[in-house]
Image (spheres, rainbow, N blue to C red):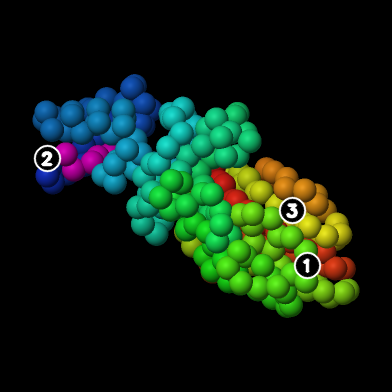
Amino acid sequence: MPNRRLPRIFGYRGAYPRTTGTEATSSEKLVGKHNHEEAYALAANNSGRGLSSENPFTSFSQPGNDNVENGIYYFQTSASTVQAYVDGTGTYTSDSTNHWVLYQSFGADNALTSSNAPGLNGNRILINQGGWNDVNWQYYEDGNSGNLAGYSRGTGFVAFFAGSANTAYWDGTIPFTTEITATRYHLATRASTDSYLYHKNSSGGFVSVQSGIAASNTWYSKGSPNNHLVGGPHIRLFEGNGSIAAIGQLWVR
């Protein structure tokens, strides 16, 4: 195994020690010459991942691997170390099978806030915030401002509408390249059914991962948008023919 980066316990600044076994599990052991600080750091690293900024989760699959309780944990992304909420019981995601990490919540009145359930890239995202940009919408409602001509967006959602037979997009950019293996969306259409969810593929183009979105608030679990490509949006919500696209929560694992 390559040299293992360990948390800097007690201000330790030595070279990274070598280990054997499976990384971040009880089978991982130090090899060669080592000291007590390194032994303690390895034990702390493998028993308390995500509990401190010195020992963050380094992938979105680790909370599930460790079977952690619901709560706020530290994550090391390709951009920085951030805190985010993990739901493994379906309290917020309605999925008790998997551990999901909150990426963003939407709408000025969303119940998931930076205090009780921080997202990896923000909470209560409004129109054109949090890496999202509009293309061609005419009306929107996000709980802060906007006008949907009498249509209800739903509490804790951002909704947008182009009107008549026009179409509109809302593109989202993932600002870091940490691997995402699956996504879970809380979506709705509010009017009509001509709406789609797209992910960017490995060639840089968009492909539909959900054709038609229910009028009621519905959960959709999908594969991974290709956020390893340089720049540009990775997720796209599309509405056409008078539909209203709405998003309330986005989770990853």
Mark 1 is surrounded, within 10 Å at the Cα level, by few (under 14), some (14 to 19) or many (20 or more) other residues, namely few
Image quarter of the C terminus: top right
Identify residue type, mark 1: Gly
Q: How many numbered badges does the structure rendering display?
A: 3
Element class at badge 3: strand
Foreground: 9 or 109?
A: 109
Mark 2 is surrounded, within 10 Å at the Cα level, by few (under 14), some (14 to 19) or many (20 or more) other residues, namely few
The x, y position of residue 65, in whole percent, is 47, 30
Instruction: Please tell me which residue is depicted at 80% across the width and 52% down the height of the picture.
Output: 215
**Residue 150 numbered tag:** 1
The stretch of residues the image draws in magenta is 1-10
The x, y position of residue 202, in whole percent, is 64, 58
Q: Which residue is mark 2?
A: 10
On the image, which quarter does residue 72 sit in? top left
Foreground: 98 or 19?
A: 98
Instruction: Please tell me which residue is depicted at 54% across the width and 49% down the height of the picture.
Output: 111
Q: Is residue 4 magenta?
A: yes
Identify residue type, mark 2: Phe
**Residue 188 numbered tag:** 3
Spatial CA distance of label 2 from label 3 is 50 Å
